[in-house]
Image (cartoon, rainbow, N blue to C red):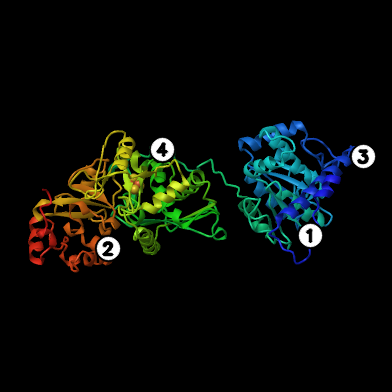
Amino acid sequence: MQFARGLLPPHVKRVHHLPYLGPLLDAGMATILAFEIKEGIRSVVDPEFYYPHEDPDTDAGKIWLGPADDTILRKRGVEFVDGSAPGFAAIVGACPDPETAKMIVEDYQLKNLYIFCASGHNGTSVIEQLIEAGVQVGWNTRIVPFGPYISSAVFALGFANRAAMAFGGVQAGDYKKILVYNKNRIFAFVNAFGEVGTQWGAAAAGCVNWGFPTLADTDIPEILPTGICTYEHVVANVPHEEICQKSVEVRGLKVSVTEIDIPLSFGPAFEGERVRGKDLYVQCGGGKSQATELCKMAEMGDIDDGKVEVVGPDIADFEERSAFPLGVYVQIAGREFQEDFEPILERQIHHLVNYIQGIMHIGQRDIAWFRISKAAVEKGFTLKDIGVVLHAKFHQDFTKIVDKVQVTLYTKQEDVDKLTKRAKGEYKVRDERVETMTDEEEEIYYSCTLCQSFAPSHVCTVSPERTGLCGAYNWMDCKASFEINPTGPNQPIEKGECLDPLLGQWKGINDFLQGASRGAHTHYNFYSMVHDPMTTCGCCEAIAALLPTCNGVMTVNREYSGETPCGMKFTTLAGVMGGGASSPGFVGHSKFNITQRKFISGDGGLLRLVWMPKILKEEIKERLEKRGEELGVPDLYDKIADETVGTTEEEVLEFLQKVGHPALEMDPIIG
Ligand code: SF4
Ligand code: ZN
């Protein structure tokens, strides 16, 4: 008691406000010590008071179990170590009615938490309310009735201490390590239901010493800034419907989704599987309809974790062999989530959907393509399953940054169009984030090997002026991806000695490439499609091809299904080049890359471009005109031929001569 008294700080004046957590924590600790002593005395003077069993004997009125003995601690404590119980909710007081108590406690049970109860309010307690509502309480249902007093709440902290000592190797008395262990390993927090008097308030302050925050349903002084606890320390006025979600959020407890509840097998084994014509049931995108993917950050309170909604008809409503539009809209909220992470999660949709047996996914952004097999539909696949997969995997793979995931799947044309329009705006903003950066000024480039499951020797290297060929990853995105996942597919590469400034080749990149392609490639050039170009995989937004007669190049985008002057359609080109090879005369690239300053600069740059499909030309018109001006050819846009001019080299050449295309004046492209 003397020691506890010694911890008490001098009384604070009313005007004294809170950044000084230290004295408050000491006062809280003094309270906890006093509670411990009080309960110790109780067990001596009234040894029958608690009923030290796993479950109470409600018929005999023996509902309070008191502190956990060593047997219970060993049996239950281990669950806190192996993760089957992430932590506990310590509840003090009573809810307005038994139904509310039941709702809250069951919510915690669903999250696998233990519920440690103490004290009461207005002549009742959460435990008594639960018994009244027919809920089974006891260690076996993880609802533990510790005691009727606020001092019996100390048993929850005692449990935390002993778990740290028994399983974390922490020595008794090492309060700093106890804090660190509990803060990092035991996801516990306090819910205070009812009037928070002096003793409750002091207990709440005490719990901060373990890293356990308090959330109350009443108006008590809040302690919001982060210091000891992961986030806020004391949060007031939380409505009962929200207290579970809010507690989990404030404590930083991560939802673990272990089951992916879909009627099909799921996993990397199915990633490379194709859905061929004869197996196809329905499809979205791929030139047959519009398919768009967008991932956006949301406010915590604005989305419901795990909510998956299909707006419009689902698979069963479409005729076999038809194509329907699809918009996949993923909203993510997280304490640590940033807008910069959106493209990274969005890009995961590709391989995650491919992980579903019988479903094939190609492309990204607004040129995605979903192919759904008959076998999958027979097994009961619906669009909702896409959302279920994304929700589960985003939680599993991005635990650190993801707290909530909500997925909406649109299948009505007007909704998909609306989403696509919005998505295009978002893509533009993302693309332009690297606009002012140059390759020269950056020593670190990033690798991307996300596509190796389809194209094993393919290695993208992303520099500020050469975004990934899928268009979904630029230098910034790769950097953010590396931050989230330091051992993931995006590794920083020190570019090292420059071996060829014109074609864009560096020693550091070559060394990395050799390892990452497992010896398949020894080197490649960033800025050339003629000489040892970068490798190409099937995701590319566009493919450039040499047109020797025109002394220039053409490019064709995925959405354009017609003939091209190089004699191959996009699909043929992608089929030939898309396996991870470096094919001189051809290179896959993103649409945005066309107007980046380094686009095939080793071959003469943008002024070499003599033909591209009209839709692509129009899509990038504004930027194309700007680049033309920068290059001293303000009417470049009009000088580039498209399919309305012709789809043979001869027709294109005739046009180029007529308009005086700059490529005709340049050095021979193959020298
Ligand atoms: Fe990464 Fe390249 Fe695949 Fe895009 S195309 S995901 S940048 S490997
Ligand atoms: Zn790819």
Q: Give the answer, above or below, for where 510 lies relative to 208.
A: above
Query: Could you tell me the amino acid type at mark 1?
Result: Glu
Q: Give the answer, above or below, for where 404 lies relative to 86.
A: below
Query: Could you tell me the amino acid type at mark 3?
Result: Val
Distance, label 4 to label 3, CA atoms, is 63 Å
Q: How many marks?
A: 4
- The residue to which callout 4 is attached is 268
Marks 1 & 4, CB-CB < 8 Å contact: no
- The residue to which callout 2 is attached is 620
Q: Position of residue 187 (x, y in %)?
A: 64, 45
Q: Which residue is nearer to you in this view: 631 or 278?
A: 631
Q: Position of residue 29 (x, y in %)?
A: 77, 48
For residue 162, what is the image quadrant?
A: top right
- The residue to which callout 1 is attached is 195
| Nearest to N terminus: mark 4 or mark 3 | 3
Q: Is residue 549 left or right of residue 9?
A: left
Query: Could you tell me the amino acid type at mark 4?
Result: Pro
For residue 48, what is the image quadrant?
A: top right
Mark 2 falls on what kind of element? loop
Distance, label 3 to label 1, CA atoms, is 29 Å
Q: Residues within 10 Å of mark 4 (few under 14, many from 20)?
A: some
